Every structure is written in C-alpha cells, then in structure tokens.
Image (cartoon, grey):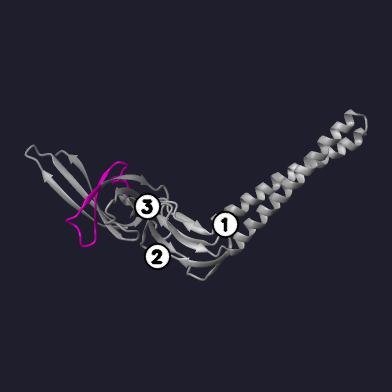
C-alpha cells in the first residue's frame, strides 16, 4: 500500500536541477518458511504445553497423545516377532534334516522342495514382523510431538483433551531471526523501484529507530484485492522487534538530473 510521495528539487549554480523523489510505502511483517506440525497418529491429547508466542528449541516437547494403545501395539508386535523367529528356527531345522535325508536318498526331491519353501516363507514372516514392530515403535514415538526448529509458536490449533486424527494441524512454528516484509506499490510507482534498491524501514511510533534493507523481489502480477504490486524485503531480526503481522513503514529515494 502506498501512503505518499514527496519531491525535492535542488538547483545547482550550473543550472542543472536534481529532482529527488521519496516514495513512502506501507507493509506488513511476514514469516519466512513457517513450519506446520500435524499429528502423525490418532488419539487424545493429554497435555498441550506450547502457547502462542513461546520460544521453543528443536526437540522440545509441545504436546503428547495418549500412548497406552501404542504401547500395547509395540508389545504385540514384539511377541509376533518372537513367534515368527521361533517358527523360522523350526523350519530351518526341518530343512537341514531333510537335506541330510536327501543325501542318503531317504527323501524325495519334492519333500525337500516343500521344506525349503516352508523355511523361506518363515523367513519372510520374520521380516514382515520386524517391519510391523518398527512401525509400531514409530507410532509410539509419534505420540510425543516435538518442535522441529528453533523458533517461536505462531499458531496453536488444539487444546488438551481434544481428539486428533492423523494429519490434524497442531502448531505453526517459525524462526523470526529473519523476517520478510511485504509492501504494495501502484503500477505508477514501479518505474521508481528496482531490485537491490535501498529502503528505510520503521515501525509505527518508532520512526527514529530505522533499519535499512534492499528490495529483493517485485511481483509481476498485482494483488487481487488491492490491485497493487507486492514488493518484498528481508531484514535481520535477532532481537525479535519485528513480529508477524506488525505494520511497517518504508521510504525509498530516487533521483533524476535535468539540465536547462
């Protein structure tokens, strides 16, 4: 959104005039690559620890889903694996014994082939049981929802005691050490803007605390609602002064030289 333009014309002794145009824009702080956390398993949320605005570290716990059923599933799959291994041991023993009998010509080739097929089937069952146990363990681990980045919680979608399905949105996280600011400029101002152009930024009520940035990108299509073109800059924000959604003012300067 454009909020104004001012002109200053300075005339040198040589008769050459320098026209300085200052374009003032209005914009808003945006997140860069926010992370959306969703539930990987279904269940009841036991406790939601994270609150909007909280700082979080990568790996810190945000909420937990009741794990009783998933603990039982791990035990069940572990038992299935033990049974499959025991069966495979028996089938291997039978096959080895049949090999000895076949060498002594006390067993037909067909009987040996059947024993080998049973052993191979038992091995496959063991591998399947291992996969199912790994899946059960992964589901159990997924009952604890942790932050995947160092940042802050920008959105929270759930409360303690709620039932969630797999894929239910839980949190939005973002690192705001660097933020993007989007401004809008009218089509008549585009000629005065270019990528790499310096701009001065400040928050409402803090005009004396300006920061300098450079234009990184200018949209090629206007916004559907404002019919203005988006202009983007990014700034370092280590102290988190600029928060998502805050209104930001910007001023640019361009000059042209004219002779008499």
Q: Which residue is mark 1?
A: 140
Residue in the foreground of this view, choosing between 238 and 49:
49
Q: Between marks 1 and 3, how big is the CA–CA gap?
A: 28 Å
Q: Which residue is mark 3?
A: 175
Residue at position x 90%, y 37% in the image: 111
- Give coordinates of residue 2: x percent, y percent: 29, 57
Q: Nearer the viewer, mark 1 or mark 2?
A: 1
Residue at position x 83%, y 40% in the image: 94
Identify the image quadrant of the N terminus. Answer: bottom left
Q: Residue furthest left?
A: 13
> Eyeballing the image, is 197 above or below 237?
above
Q: Which residue is mark 2?
A: 51
Q: Earlier in the sequence, mark 3 or mark 2?
A: 2
Q: Bounds of the magenta span?
A: 190-212
Residue in the foreground of this view, choosing between 56 and 10:
56
- Give coordinates of residue 71: x percent, y percent: 60, 60
Kind of element beneath mark 1:
helix
Horizontal side, residue 167 vs residue 240: left or right? right
Whether residue 122 is visible, yes or no, is: no
> Eyeballing the image, is 244 above or below 131?
below
Identify the image quadrant of the C terminus. Answer: top left
Kind of element beneath mark 3:
loop
Q: Residues within 10 Å of mark 1 (few under 14, many from 20)?
A: many
Q: Find out whether residue 245 is within the magenta segment.
A: no
Residue at position x 57%, y 65% in the image: 43
Q: How many marks?
A: 3
- Give coordinates of residue 140: x percent, y percent: 57, 57
Q: Residues within 10 Å of mark 2 (few under 14, many from 20)?
A: some
Whether residue 204 is visible, yes or no, is: yes
Q: Find out whether residue 194 is within the magenta segment.
A: yes
- Badges 3 and 2: C-beta atoms under 8 Å apart? no
Kind of element beneath mark 2:
loop
């Amino acid at each position: 959104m454009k909020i104004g333009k001012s002109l200053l014309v300075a005339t040198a002794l040589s008769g050459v005039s320098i026209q300085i145009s200052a374009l003032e824009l209005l914009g808003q702080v945006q997140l860069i690559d926010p992370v959306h956390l969703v539930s990987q398993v279904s269940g009841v949320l036991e406790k939601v620890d994270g609150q909007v605005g909280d700082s979080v570290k990568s790996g810190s716990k945000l909420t937990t889903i009741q794990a009783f059923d998933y603990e039982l599933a791990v035990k069940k799959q572990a038992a299935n694996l033990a049974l499959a291994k025991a069966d495979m041991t028996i089938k291997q023993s039978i096959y080895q014994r049949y090999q000895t009998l076949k060498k002594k010509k006390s067993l037909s080739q067909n009987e040996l082939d059947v024993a080998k097929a049973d052993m191979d089937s038992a091995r496959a069952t063991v591998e399947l049981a291992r996969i199912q146990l790994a899946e059960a363990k992964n589901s159990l681990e997924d009952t604890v929802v942790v932050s995947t980045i160092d940042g802050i919680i920008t959105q929270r979608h759930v409360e303690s005691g709620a039932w969630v399905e797999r894929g239910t949105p839980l949190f939005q996280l973002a690192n705001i050490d660097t933020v993007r600011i989007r401004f809008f400029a009218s089509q008549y101002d585009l000629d005065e803007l270019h990528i790499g152009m310096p701009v001065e930024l400040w928050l409402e009520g803090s005009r004396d605390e300006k920061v300098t940035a450079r234009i990184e990108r200018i949209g090629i299509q206007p916004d559907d609602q404002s019919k203005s073109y988006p202009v983007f800059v990014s700034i370092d924000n280590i102290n988190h002064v600029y928060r998502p959604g805050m209104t930001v003012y910007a001023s640019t300067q361009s000059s042209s030289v004219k002779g008499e």
